[in-house]
Amino acid sequence: MKKIARTHPPAPSLYEGRGELTLLAAGRVTKRGTSVAGWVLGGLLALPAHAQPVSFSKEIAPIIQRRCAGCHGERTNLGEWRAHTFAALLKPGASGAAMVVPGKPEASELYKRIVHKDPDLRMPKSDDALNTQQVAAVKRWITEGAKFDGGNKAALLKILLGPRVHPAAPARYRTPVPVLALAFVPGGKQIAVGGYNEITLWDTETGKLVRRIGGLPQRIQSLQASKDGKTLLVGGGIPGEYGEVALVELATGKRRVLDTFGDLVLTARFNTDETRVAAGGAEASVRCYEAKNGERLWSMSVHADWVTSVSFSGDGKYVASASRDHTVKVYEADGTLYTTYGGHNRQIGQYKGQDPVYGVCFTGNTALSVGGGKWVQQWEPEKAKAESGDAGDMEERFFKQGHAQFLAHNCEKEIYQLCLKEGQVFTLASDGIVKQLELASQKEIRSFGQSGDFAFSLDTEMTAQKLAVGSFDGTVRVFELRNGQQKLAFAARP
Amino acid sequence: MRIKFLHCINTQPSPTLLRRGRVARREERTKSRVGSGLLGSGILLAFAATSAQAQERIVVTPPSVALTSARDARQVVVTGFFGGQPRDLTEKAVFTSSNPKIAKLVGSRVAVAGDGKASVTVKVAGKVFTVPVSVSGAKKADPVRFAFETVPILTKQGCASGSCHGSPHGKGGFSLSLFGYEPKIDRIALTRDGFSRRVNTMEPAESLMLKKPTLAIPHVGGKRLRVGDTRYTTLNQWIAEGAEVGVPSASVAKIEVTPGGRRVLEAPYKNQQLSVIAELTDGTKRDVTALATYESSHPSVASVDADGKITGKSRGFAAVSVRYLDKVQALDLTVVEPRPSFVWKPQPEKNAIDGLVNSRLKQLQCLPAATCSDSEFLRRVSLDLTGMLPGAAASKAFLADKSPEKRAKLIDSLLASEEFARFWALKKADLMRVSPKHLTTDQAGRFSRWLVEATRTNLPYDKLADAIITATGSTEQSPAASYFLAIKTPEERTELTAQVFLGSRIECAKCHNHPFENWTMRDYYKIAAVFARTEAKKGQVTLATKGEVKHPTTGENMEPWSKTASSTEDRRTAFARWLTTPQNPFFARVEANRIWAELTGRGIVEPVDDFRVSNPPSNPALLDWLTQEFVKSGFDRKKLIRLICQSQTYQRVAVAPKAADEALFSHAKVRLLTAEQLQDAIGATAGMLASATTLPTQLAALDSQLTQRAATLEAEYPSWLATQTRLAKALPLWQSTWRDSEKPLTDITEGQEYRFEEGERQTRTLTRTIHSDVARTVTIALKFSDQATLKVNGAALPGNLKRTPTHMLNLQPGENTIELRMTGDNLTFTWKLADDTSGLSSPLIEALRAENTAPVHDFYLANDAKRTQLLGQRATLDDRVAYATQRPWPEQTAFTKTFGQPARETACTCERRQTPTLLQALELLNGRTSYETVAAGAARYAAFSDTLLLDELYLTALARFPTEKERTVAIAFLKNAPERTAAVTDLLWTVVNTQEFLFQK
C-alpha cells in the first residue's frame, strides 16, 4: 500500500464506515495522480489471511454486482438467474442447480461456475475470469456458511454498500463541466452551481468564484436552497452506478446523506415547510424522507423510466413525479399512488404526442407539467383521477380533451426545466431559451436568451429579480427578470 | 465432414464501382508515387521455382510506409506465390524496426513513435525485405475525429447494431443511429442526451460509454471493449479531447482492401491478414484496418477477428465483408483441407461447364456422381424444360432409341416446343406480379401472352428487359406496360426491378445503408427517380414531364440512376441502357444464375435474387464463364439452357455420393415437383390430361367444325338479313348507339348498369339519337351513381335526376338528340326506354337502317350459339386452360397453393415454397384433387391387359418400364382384387404417392 501515493481520500474505502475491500471503482484513474483501483488492489494484496469471516456486503456483493449482475440482473436474467439482490441470487437458475450450498463451495453452482474449466461454462462468460483473491473470497464465504450481513435481503446489492466517500474536487477543471443544476442562495447575491465532485458558489454581480464545497457526488443533478439559505438539498451521483440525496450546510459544507440509489438522483425537493424531502432519479423510484432525521417514509417504483422531477403540493397533500415514461404520477402524503396523469401521452386529437415529462410543480392544488410537446399542461389531481378510467371507456376518453389546460410555450425544443414563482411560469428548453408565461392571463411575458447548445438547469430569484441558466458548455448566464436582459455570463469552471 | 453453405459472396464491383472503373485504373497507374500501393506495386522479388509448390516470389505490401500523424499506423501484408497461387505469409514473417523510437511495431502493424526515417525489416522464408518508413507530425496533436473514428468504433463494437442501441428505440434509453448512418443523431445521443450522462470529459475513463462496454458496471449488452485496447484508447482520447462532434467537410470516397477478389486458404497457409485503406473525398488516405468491421458469411468455414485476420477453419467457401462507414468490400475465400484418402478420378466432360465444375470439385476434394439413366434424364429434362412428364409414347420411343445423339436431340426438340415457351414464361410471370390482385384479367392475359411470345421467339434477354422497363402506352399496344400497372410507386418499382433484373434485395436501403451491401440509400432513391415520371393510370402507362423522388433524410431531389441523353429522354430508357450493357455487373450474371438454378435446383449464388458482397458464388469461375457465354451469345437464353442441359454436370445421377457438397453440383439435386408440375403430372398419369402434343390435332378438328359451321351460316345469311332489315326499317321508335366523344359505346346494354373505368372524379358526356315516327312522350328509367343532367334537343330535363327513377321525354317526329352529362367518382348509370320494344340492339338497328353490312354480319355471326360454343372450346384449348404448367397465369387452387404456388405478391423467388409440408402429405394421401383425378382415370387403365396397364402407367408416371419385381407384385395384386377398377385406382394412387413420382431425380 505504501507504494501508492495517496492524496485522497483519506479513508481506505469508498464507503463510509465499512470494511476495506471493494472493487466497485476499479479502473478509475484520475488526473490527480491516484489510482483508486491501485490502492484497493494494493489493500487486497497486502492483506494477510483473513482473521475475520468474509463479509457478504463488503466483499462478495461488490464482486457479484460488478461481474455478474450485468447479465444476471434486474434487466436481464440470462440462464433465468438474477443476482441483483441477495434473495435473488439464492434462487436456482434454469439448470435448477443449487446456487449456494452453505459450507459446500464444490456443491454450489455459484462457485463451480467461476472456476469451471470449460470456457463456455466458466463465468463471467466471454470475459476475464475472477482473480484468485476474488475466487478465494467467494469460496471462503460459502465455506463459512454463506452468511448475509446486509440487513435487507431484498435490497439491491449496489445499495447495500451505503453512502460513498467522494473524492475531493479537482483543483482546476481541465475541461468545462456541464451545469446540470444551479440554485440561487436566497437573496440572490450568490448562486450555487453543480460542479465536479463539488458545489461552487459564485457572486451573481461579478461572476467571481466565492466558495467551493467539496466531497460531494461526481455529478450534481439537482439543487434547492432552503428558505433560510442555510441548507442546500443536493441530488446527484455517478451515472449508471450510484445516486445520492443529501443535505449540505452552506456555512460548514457538512453533508448529511439521506439515502443512496443505484443510479443518479435527478431531482430532490423540499415540501413547503421543509420538513420533508422527495427525490427520484434514473433508478425510476420516488422516495420521501423526514428532513430532520433522514427517515425514509416511503418508496414507490411505479414509473417505467427515469424520474426527472418531483414536487410537493402547497398543502402537502400530494407528491407528484414526472418521468421519461410520458406520465406524471401523483401520490398521497403517505405514498399511496393517487392517480396517473396521461396528458403527455395522447394518441389522437389536437394535443396528441407521446412525450417524456421533465418538469412538474404545483400551484395550490393545480399541477403544471412539461417536457416534449408544445404545451405547458395545467391540471388538477382530483379531476385527473376522475377522468382516468378503465379500458372500457378508453375510446370515449380519447376524444375528450378533459379538464387540462394547454398553455403553448412556442419553443422548438423539448422543455427540460419548469419553475413556478408568484404566478409566473418559467420554462427552459433544451436549446437554452427560457420563456416566462403568466398563469392568470395565459400570456407569454418574456423570452430570455437565444437558441444555442444544450442547457440543463434553471432557477429564479424573485426578490433580486434574477434568473439563471446553466449550459452544456459549462456557462452560467444570469438575466434580469424585469427586462430579460442578460446581465452576466461566466464559465463555472474553477 | 459436412460443409455448411454460406450465404455466399459476390465479387463483382457495385454498380457505382462499375462507373468508377476507369478512375480506379487511372489511380492504380499513379499509385506507386503514393506511399501505400496495392499488391501489384509492392516489393517484388522473383526467383526460380524449384517445384510446382515452391514459392516463386514474395510481395510485401506496402513497399514503403509514410506515417503523417501521431496516431497513424499501417498494416503490412506479406504474400508469397506458390505455383501462381498467392498465400499469406504475414503471420510467418518476422518484423523488426531499425529504430523503435521512430517506427514501432505492433504485430505486423507499423505505428508512430517519433519523427524521422527508419525502416522495417521483414524476414520471411529465408528472405529479407526492407520497408522504408518515414514519420512526420508525431509531436503534433492528432485529435480523434468523431465521424471517422468514434462512429466506426461504435459500429465495430456492435453498439450501433440493430439489436442494440441502433434499434429504432435504442436500448436502455440510449439510442444510436443504425451502423452510424446518421452521425447527427449520434452526436446528440453521445454527448448531450440523457443530461449528458454518457461522457465525462473531466475523467474520460469514468464515462458511462466506457464503463458499460468494459463491464466496469453492469451492461446488458455484455463486454464490448477491453480497457487498453486501441479502440478503447481512441474513444478515451476522443472524450479527453472534449468529445468534439464537429461535422467533417469530407466523406469516405472508397475503401481499398488488400488482398481483394478471391483467395484460397490451404494448410499450412490458413490465415489471411487484411489491410484496409480509406480514401476520403479530400484525397487523404488512412489505414482503417483497426476501425473497419469484418464479418464472415460462414464463420465455421473461415472466421475473421477484429483486426482483420482471417483464419480458415474447415473445407468450404465463405466471404468476408469489410465495412467502413458506408463502404463495403468483400473477399471470397475457399478453404481447402487436405484429405489424404482422396484420389481424383478423371471425369467425362461434355463441355466447358464440366471442366469448371470438376476443377472446383477437385479443389474441394469431392468426387462427382455418375451419369444418370436415360429414363431419369428424360423425365428430368422434360419437367425442367416443359414442366410436364414426357408421356408414355415418347418415353417408350426415347428408351428404344439407340442413337448416341438422342439426349442432345431431345433437348433441341423440347427447346423448340410450345410447352417450353409457356412453362418458362410462367417463371417470369411469377416474378412480375401477373395476378388478378394487381391487374385486370385482360391486362394479365396480354402480359402473359407477350411473355410466352418472347420466350417462343427467344427474344434476347436484353431486348426483353428493355421492352419491359421502357413499356409505354396501353396494354393493347404494349402488353409489357402491365409491369408498371401492377406496381405503382417508384419505391416498389425500384425494389421489383432490382430484385428481378439485378438480383438484389435492396429494400433495406429504403431506410438505411445496408451494413454489408453496396447498395446505399442514395442508390435506392436514384433508382426510384428513374420511375418517378412513369405514371400508370386508367390502364395506360404515360410519361410525365415532371416528377421527382426526394431523399428522405436530406430532402434533396435525386438525380436518376443513369444520366439521360437529353432532358426529354425517358429516364427509363437511360436506365435500360445501363442495365443491358454487357458490362453491367448484375444483369447477365443474375439471369445466367437464374437459368442455372432453374435447371439444377440451386443457384451458383443462392438465393438467386440475393446477390451481395457477403453472399459468395459457390463456383465463381463457373458463374463468370456462364455470364460471359450468355453475353457473347447476345443474351440468348435458349442457347444457355441448351448448353447446361447438354453438360455432364446436368446429366449426373441424383444420388448424393459420400461427402458430396450440395452447392458444388457434384450430383443432381432431388427436387419436389412444383405445384403446377405436380398437378399436370397427376392429371397426365391418370390419363385425364391429354399430352400437350395432341393439342394441334384437337385444334385442327375444332377448326374444321368451325369452317363447316361458317359455311352453313353464310348460306343462311341473305334471308336473315332481308328479314331483319325489313323489321328495323319499320320500327316506329328506335335509339342509336351511345357515343362518348364520337366513339360508339357498343358495350352498353339497355336496362343494365354500365360502369365506366374506375378512377378519380371525372365528367362524361354521352350522346345518342332517338328516332320516332310521330311526336310522342316516352318514359325512361334512369339511375346514376352521381350528379347528372339530361338534355333532349338542347333543353335540360327539370328536377333532380337522381331523386326520381323515371322521367318523361317529349320526342319530336324524326331525329331527337339526347345528351347525358355525368360527374363523379367511379361512375355508373342505367338507361331503359320503356317503349322501345324492338328486341334488337341499338348498334344492330343502326347498322341495318344504314345498310352498313360489316357490323351486321359480325352481329349475325356473334349471335350464333353453336359457333360461340365451338369458339369457346377452341379458346380453352388454345389457352391451355387445363394445363397448370402451360399458362403463365395459372389458376390458384387450394391444391397448387398447398404445393407452394406463389401468390405473386413479391418479386422474390422464395415466394415459391420449396420445402415439403405436412399439408402436402395430407393432400396427397387424402386430398380430393389427387384422389378424384386418379379415380376418374382408373377406368381407362382398367380396360387394358395387366402388362399393358403396368407399362403404360410406369412409362407415363416415371418414364420407365416397371421392374420385374414391381410387375410381379402389381399383377398379383390385380389378380386377387375383388373389383378391378377399384384395384386399378389403388394402384394408380400408390404410384402417384411414390417418392419417385413426387420428386424429380
Image: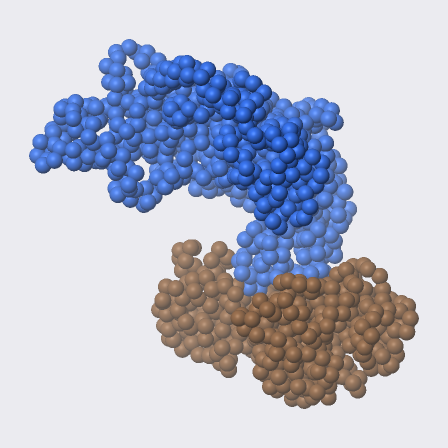
Chain colours: A brown, B blue
Quarter location, residue A141:
bottom left
Side of B629 where B160 appears, left or right: right
Res. B885 in view? no
| Residue B238 drawn at (x, y percent) | 70, 53
Q: Where does residue B398 sit, x and y in percent of width and height?
A: 27, 16
The percent coordinates of residue A276 (x first, y second) are: 67, 86
Observer able to see residue B785: yes
Q: Residue at x 40, y 74 (%)?
A: A143
Q: Quadrant of the C terminus of chain A?
A: bottom right
Q: Is residue B674 above or below residue B235?
A: above
Q: Could you tell me which quadrant the N terminus of chain A lies in?
A: bottom right
Q: Foreground residue, B576 or B774? A: B774
* A372, above or below A330, in the image: above
Task: Please state the total of marks drawn on the protein image.
Answer: 0
What is the residue that sits farthest to the front in this orientation?
B774
User: In terms of image quadrants, where is residue A476?
Assistant: bottom right
Report the residue at 55% width, 28% height from top: B731
At a point 55% along the width and 37% down the height, the residue shown is: B835
Q: Name the residue: 19% across, 34% down.
A: B985
Foreground of the two, A13 or B916: B916
Q: Quadrant of residue B170?
A: bottom right
Give the farthest residue toward the left.
B976
Q: Position of residue B987 (x, y in %)?
A: 18, 33
Residue B533 lies left or right of residue B930; in this view the side is right
